[in-house]
Amino acid sequence: MISPEARTRIQEMFARKRAEARLFPGGKPVDRNRRDWEAESRLDVLPKGSRFTPADAGGIKSEWMEMPLIDKSRVFLLLHGGGYNAGSPRTHRKMAAYLSRAAHARVLTPDYRLAPEHPFPAAVKDALLAYGWLLEQGTPEAQIVVGGDSAGGGLALSMLLALREAGAKMPRAAVLLSPWTDLSVSGGSYERLRKLDPVITREALREAGRWYAGGRDPRDPMASPLFADATGLPPLLIHVGGDETMLDDSRLFAERARAAGVEVTFKVYDGMWHVHHSGAPEVPESVAAYNDIAAFIRAQFGG
């Protein structure tokens, strides 16, 4: 049984989904989607004490987020979601603040290049530049956790795969919130859970996948980590909503990563939507998810 707060939020999202379908039968234009999300994010109420400052991370415009009483030697590299075609540090300030508190760390959110103007591998290159900048600034890889939501979760995995292929230093762990691991949207959950998902449609995601892939095969393992060999990746925490169409992106990747010998903590939140962490602090299940992230990171750093 989900909480009344979660049920209300889901009803609101379904109402919005229906309204947008009427206004934009062919889907909301990319520019309009970006502008609307940026405007809405200005209304977000950040947790008390949160502080954000601009940063230049290896040439990538970025933003630091810090909560009080954190360990400033520890960094969470947050790669924002948005289908690879929307989102920014501004749209993810609230998430960054909650992750700062959960990870007991500073959070760096890069403003990586977006599709369709900048298709794959532009976003991966930008993520690598930001990570390399952290190392150059003297942050040891053992003090870095990388993570992201939705496309940002997929991007975090692509970054890790690129680091492994280069024989480079890997971060301590990764936190993946409803990661998009399959640009070809081939999972059975896209149809099985279609009527339950108040956010994602297969059609919109398939188009976003084409924009990001550019002229490449959407099943390219570096762009769609579901089809990659996960051997050698650091410990992973994966969260996914039980009612989201993208469930199989998380479930199948978790299974394949475990089979490859990766330490995977996988949790399905029954009745929840895509990246339900957005419901904090009003939705109890969202708060519980951040508490779970905090417990995972504490375990990685030994308490």
Image (cartoon, helix red, strand yellow):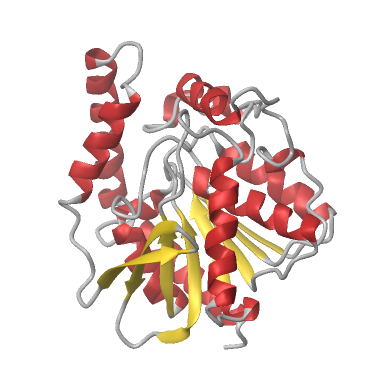
Q: Is residue 227 visible?
A: yes
21 and 127: which one is in front? 127
* Relative to 99, residue 295 above or below: below
Q: Residue furthest left?
A: 43
Q: x, y percentage for residue 100?
A: 39, 73
The residue at the point 24 percent across, 13 percent down is 22
The residue at the point 25 percent across, 73 percent down is 51
The residue at the point 39 percent across, 60 percent down is 62
Q: Is residue 88 left or right of residue 293?
A: left
Q: x, y percentage for residue 27?
A: 35, 18
Q: Residue furthest front?
A: 59
* Relative to 121, residue 298 above or below: below
50 and 73: which one is in front? 73
The residue at the point 44 percent across, 42 percent down is 274
Q: Quadrant of residue 10?
A: top left
Q: Is residue 71 left or right of residue 229?
A: left
Q: x, y percentage for residue 252?
A: 70, 42
Q: Is residue 296 visible?
A: no
